[in-house]
Image: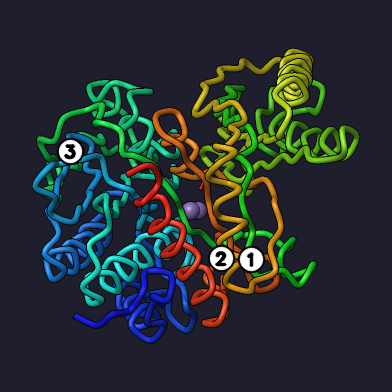
């Protein structure tokens, strides 16, 4: 077509913003920019169908594997491992339009830009979206990418029960995304994920691009406490076996502990359910989740141990029984030094301010890092807000991130080719 040089290619931000809006219009949250597309719901299916139709518009070869991951690859007669990007399109129930979706739709935009230029990269480019990254309906998070790289068998994944009692394999089948592509998948040449930071660092430092060095360790536990349900007015305090009190005390302990440990330690009790959940009934059961994260695995393990000790001692004193279930446990991940440097160098060469930083959130890239050279590109989140419909990133920052993704992928495609 034209004689444009690869390094001069730039994405079309209007096209990208339009796609982000169109995807967010599936299951929107009234009066906000956000959307609610829990994994493998009807809304997720509608989002998947739309993104797959865009992959077909670009003549990509679309492959769906046995856990419902979808990868669109530029046709390549040699079927060489592609330079791949991507992320997820499921959201938490109170999701923003950028978390995950940006990495997928920017990947489509990169491929559309390259295709329209007439340039054929030395390696094919691919964009994928992975099933159930959020882990908000089925645990663990990053499930699709975990199975993709062989970290969990597809059979085990199919049997996972969601928070609503649905079984993952049955839901995949129901929404027609139970594919036949082999698992674990054959590794791409390399993987780059563009994502909103979801935290306050880039904005506070007035930096446009984060070259992500790795992802902190993640520990999710579900606790189920069983006590003695009884009348709230007649049961003397000394005779109570109240699982609610144990749950609340543990939630407060988590907060105090992470403050005491300081530094990068974070901890959250994000879900708590009492049964029967009535004003005048001592609860029979309390079920709650604990999310602990740290970049240092030893500190994370120490936090896990101390929370567990507190929980068990408090429950024993109250006469309440404890059952715990590990929902997710992923060690901290370091990304590939060369790809991190490439992201940082590419961003600088495009004139953007850049900072190397770890990720606080979990990402599919942390799984892909097990099988190929991987790194991530972050762009700022306004007010550091995410997992909230108010999540926002300016069009200028989206454009910057997508252009860094484009140029990083083009450079990877030529690397040693
Ligand atoms: C998943 O995206 C998480 O970081 O909670
Ligand atoms: Mn995400
Ligand atoms: Mn998320």
The answer to whether marks 1 and 3 mark residues whose Cβ atoms lie closer than 8 Å is no
Residue at position x 50%, y 37% from top? 366
Tag 1 residue: 348
Locate the N terminus and report the quarter of the image it occupies: bottom left
Decide if residue 157 is in sight here. Answer: yes
Residue at position x 44%, y 47% from top? 134
Tag 2 residue: 388
In this image, 121 relative to 54: left or right? Answer: right
Decide if residue 284 is in sight here. Answer: no
Tag 3 residue: 65
Cα–Cα gap, marks 2 and 3: 30 Å
Q: Is residue 322 above or below residue 255?
A: above
Badge 3 element: loop
The numbered mark at residue 14 is: none
149 or 412: nearer the viewer: 412
Residue at position x 32%, y 50% from top? 39
301 or 206: nearer the viewer: 206
Residue at position x 29%, y 27% from top? 157
Badge 2 element: loop
Badge 1 element: helix
């Amino acid at each position: 077509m034209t004689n444009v040089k690869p390094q001069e290619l730039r994405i079309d931000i209007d096209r990208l913003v339009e796609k982000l809006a169109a995807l967010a219009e599936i299951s929107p949250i009234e009066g906000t920019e956000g959307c609610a597309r829990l994994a493998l719901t009807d809304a997720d299916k509608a989002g998947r169908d739309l993104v797959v139709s865009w992959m077909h518009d670009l003549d990509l070869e679309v492959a769906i594997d046995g856990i419902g991951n979808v990868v669109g690859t530029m046709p390549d007669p040699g079927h060489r491992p592609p330079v791949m990007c991507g992320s997820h399109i499921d959201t938490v129930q109170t999701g923003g339009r950028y978390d995950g979706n940006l990495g997928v739709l920017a990947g489509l935009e990169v491929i559309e830009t390259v295709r329209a230029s007439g340039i054929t990269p030395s390696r094919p480019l691919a964009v994928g979206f992975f099933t159930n990254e959020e882990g908000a309906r089925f645990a663990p998070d990053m499930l699709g990418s975990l199975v993709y790289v062989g970290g969990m068998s597809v059979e085990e994944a199919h049997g996972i029960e969601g928070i609503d009692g649905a079984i993952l394999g049955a839901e995949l089948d129901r929404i027609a995304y139970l594919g036949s592509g082999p698992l674990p998948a054959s590794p791409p040449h390399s993987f780059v994920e563009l994502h909103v930071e979801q935290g306050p660092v880039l904005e506070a430092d007035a930096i446009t691009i984060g070259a992500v060095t790795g992802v902190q360790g993640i520990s999710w536990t579900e606790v189920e406490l069983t006590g003695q349900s009884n009348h709230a007015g007649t049961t003397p305090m000394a005779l109570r076996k109240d699982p609610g009190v144990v749950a609340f005390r543990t939630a407060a302990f988590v907060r105090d502990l992470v403050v005491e440990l300081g530094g990068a330690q974070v901890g959250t009790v994000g879900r708590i359910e009492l049964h029967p959940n009535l004003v005048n009934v001592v609860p029979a059961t309390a079920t709650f989740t604990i999310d602990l994260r740290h970049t240092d695995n030893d500190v994370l393990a120490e936090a896990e141990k101390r929370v567990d000790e507190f929980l068990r001692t408090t429950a024993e004193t109250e006469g309440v029984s404890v059952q715990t279930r590990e929902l997710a446990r992923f060690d901290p991940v370091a990304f590939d030094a060369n790809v991190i440097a490439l992201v940082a160098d590419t961003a600088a060469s495009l004139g953007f301010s850049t900072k190397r930083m770890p990720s606080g959130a979990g990402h599919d890239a942390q799984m892909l890092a097990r099988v190929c050279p991987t790194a991530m590109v972050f762009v700022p989140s306004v007010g550091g807000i995410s997992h909230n419909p108010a999540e926002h990133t300016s069009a200028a920052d989206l454009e910057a991130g997508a252009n860094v993704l484009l140029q990083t992928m083009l450079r990877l495609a030529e690397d040693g080719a």
